[in-house]
């Protein structure tokens, strides 16, 4: 049986290769679980539970889970953190957790991972419940407005385009894949942009036709997306038009409705 682990720090960097200088491919948030598939010196190749993403973490940041605790957490009630950033406390250790983090067995005050108890006073929502209304999805997305772009990032201090969409939809009750091309394979296809509503996802391709970018439509001819930072730009059937540089930055490929 593969060994399991869980993120017990604010953000756990996952890299493409077993070295500190390697590309950051994603980050795990507090409470996210993974399985270990390979060990290479001080590095572990993991696969995440929520989106089946693979990469390497340093063993110094690994928190192991025994099989019984892993099963308990998988089957437990889960809550999703809605605050952009909020502190959590375990005994005398206090540290920040960010939007999209997972709390287990949370009773409104205390969460539990095995025998470890964590006190949290921020805003949460039961996992999978979420907000089905388009206006609520946009309000969630707006919390991350102006967050800086970071390849592989999934937090308010650095986030990429697909990580942005993935986090907002988790808070809305839907787990999406990690990368834009994977997300483009989900949902219902819309054939015309005038059919779209707030919360629908727009995907963009390069000259070879490969999906390279994703953003969330706001329903008023604009799109919120992570490009340089989380920003709002205009969009039409050609793609994203940036008024600041007076040209199109991304070519529209497909629109999907998730909710």
Image (tube, helix red, strand yellow):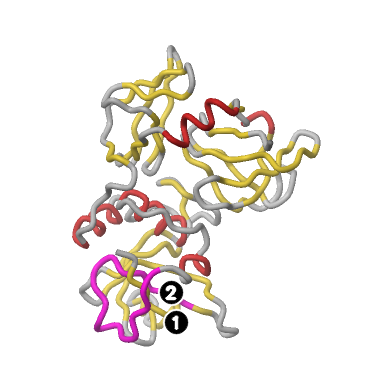
133 left or right, relative to 168: left
Secondary-structure class at tag 2: strand
Q: Is residue 33 magenta?
A: no
- In the image, is residue 192 part of the stretch drawn in magenta? yes
- Residue drawn at (25%, 68%) of the image: 218
Which image quadrant is residue 27 in? top right
Q: Which residues are magenta?
A: 187-204
Placement of 46 over or under 233, stated as above or below: above
Question: Where is residue 109 shown, x and y percent of the image?
Answer: 28, 22
Q: What's the residue at 54%, 80% (across, down)?
A: 206
- Dot 2, crowdedness within 10 Å: few (<14), some or many (≥20)? many
Position of the C terminus, as image quadrant, is bottom left
**Residue 203: assigned label:** 2
Residue at figure coordinates x 30%, y 52% from the top left: 172
Residue 233 percent location from the top left of the image: 32, 71
Contact? badges 1 and 2 (CB < 8 Å): yes
User: Relative to 247, does residue 90 appear above or below in the rendering?
Assistant: above
Q: Is residue 242 above or below residue 159?
A: below
Seen from the viewer's position, the closer of residues 170 and 128 is 128
Q: Residues within 10 Å of mark 1 (few under 14, many from 20)?
A: many
Which residue of the protein is positioned furthest toward the top in this rendering? Answer: 92
Q: Earlier in the sequence, mark 1 or mark 2?
A: 2
Element marked by disc 1: strand
- Residue at 46% x, 32% y is 73
Residue 36 is situated, as x and y percent measured from the top left of the image, at: 67, 39
Quickly name the residue at label 1. 253
Relative horizontal placement of residue 105, taking residue 57 as reference (left or right): left
Q: Quadrant of the N terminus?
A: top right
Q: Distance from label 1 to label 2 (Cα)? A: 6 Å
């Amino acid at each position: 049986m593969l060994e399991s682990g869980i993120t017990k720090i604010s953000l756990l960097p996952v890299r493409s290769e077993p070295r500190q200088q390697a590309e950051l491919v994603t980050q795990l948030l507090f409470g996210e679980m993974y399985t270990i598939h390979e060990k290479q010196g001080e590095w572990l190749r993991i696969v995440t539970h929520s989106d089946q993403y693979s990469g390497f973490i340093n063993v110094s940041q690994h928190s192991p889970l025994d099989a019984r605790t892993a099963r308990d957490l998988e089957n437990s009630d889960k809550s999703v953190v809605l605050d952009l950033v909020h502190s959590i406390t375990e005994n005398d250790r206090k540290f920040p957790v960010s939007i999209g983090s997972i709390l287990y067995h949370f009773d409104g005050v205390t969460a539990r991972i095995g025998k470890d108890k964590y006190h949290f006073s921020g805003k949460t929502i039961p996992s999978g419940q979420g907000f089905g209304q388009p206006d609520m999805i946009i309000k969630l997305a707006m919390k991350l407005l102006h967050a800086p772009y970071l390849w592989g990032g999934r937090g308010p201090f650095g986030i990429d385009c697909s990580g942005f969409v993935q986090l907002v939809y988790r808070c809305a009750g839907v787990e999406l894949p990690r990368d834009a091309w994977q997300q483009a394979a989900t949902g219902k296809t819309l054939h015309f942009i005038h059919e779209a509503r707030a919360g629908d996802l727009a995907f963009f391709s390069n000259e070879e036709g490969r999906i390279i970018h994703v953003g969330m439509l706001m329903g008023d001819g604009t799109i919120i997306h992570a490009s340089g930072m989380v920003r709002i730009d205009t969009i039409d059937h050609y793609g994203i038009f940036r008024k600041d540089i007076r040209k199109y930055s991304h070519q529209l490929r497909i629109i999907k409705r998730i909710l």
